[in-house]
Image (cartoon, rainbow, N blue to C red):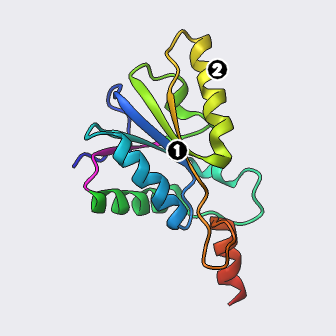
């Protein structure tokens, strides 16, 4: 299985991105759908840099290396071939890499995928096919998020 934290060359296929702090069932659903969509090609996984992950948040987010390790462990369990890259803006290589054809997002970030497609159009690149998954709720019926999970662990 290929794993890299540095860009080697343009990849074709599917991409997914996020902060992936406190990996939860919603993240696993997203990553699983992306792995499935990659059809044995290398899945490009963008994970936000420490600076981007911290912006606009009042809570501390785990370091990039820790978040990337958690994603890597999960994707290896799925048997997925993947490459992890650090992203410094909302779009990462999804907006500029010609070989990509699919992006997997959650329903609350679909708008970002549509913005990425506008950027790609401006650059003369083909639009990405957008696969959107529904948000995943916990046992309490509340949408899962790393922020809520972090708050719950502080309260306990």
Q: Which residue is mark 1?
A: 17
Q: Is residue 4 visible?
A: no
Front residue of 153/101: it is 101
Question: Label 2 vs label 1: CA separation?
Answer: 17 Å
Camera-nearest label, 2 or 1: 2
In the rendered structure, the answer to whether residue 71 lies left or right of residue 80 reads: right
Front residue of 21/121: it is 121
The picture places residue 30, in percent across and down from the top left corner, at 49, 53
Residue depicted at x 32% and y 45%: 82
Tell which circle, 2 or 1, labels the residue nearer the N-terminal end. Answer: 1
Residue depicted at x 64% and y 82%: 153
Front residue of 9/22: it is 22
For the residue carrying disc 1, how many other residues have a C-alpha within 10 Å: few (<14), some (14-19), or many (20+)? many
Q: Which residue is mark 2?
A: 118
Q: Which residues are magenta?
A: 79-85
In the rendered structure, the answer to whether residue 128 lies left or right of residue 91 reads: left
Q: Which mark is residue 33?
A: none
**Vertical relation: 119 (above or below) 83:** above
Q: Is residue 33 visible?
A: yes
**Vertical relation: 41 (above or below) 31:** above
**Vertical relation: 97 (above or below) 57:** above
Q: Secondary structure at mark 2?
A: helix
């Amino acid at each position: 299985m290929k794993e890299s934290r540095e860009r080697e060359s343009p990849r074709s296929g599917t991409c997914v991105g996020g902060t992936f702090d406190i990996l939860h069932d919603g993240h696993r659903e997203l990553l699983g759908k992306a792995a499935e969509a990659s059809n044995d090609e290398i899945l490009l996984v963008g994970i936000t840099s420490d600076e981007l992950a911290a912006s606009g948040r009042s809570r501390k987010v785990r370091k990039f290396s820790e978040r990337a390790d958690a994603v890597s462990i999960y994707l290896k369990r799925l048997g997925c071939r993947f490459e992890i890259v650090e992203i410094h803006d909302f779009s990462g290589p999804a907006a500029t890499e010609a070989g990509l054809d699919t992006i997997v997002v959650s329903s609350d970030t679909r708008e970002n995928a549509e913005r990425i497609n506008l950027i790609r159009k401006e650059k003369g690149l083909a639009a990405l096919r957008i696969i959107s998954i529904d948000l995943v709720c916990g046992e309490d019926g509340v949408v899962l998020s790393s922020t809520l999970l972090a708050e719950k662990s502080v309260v306990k």
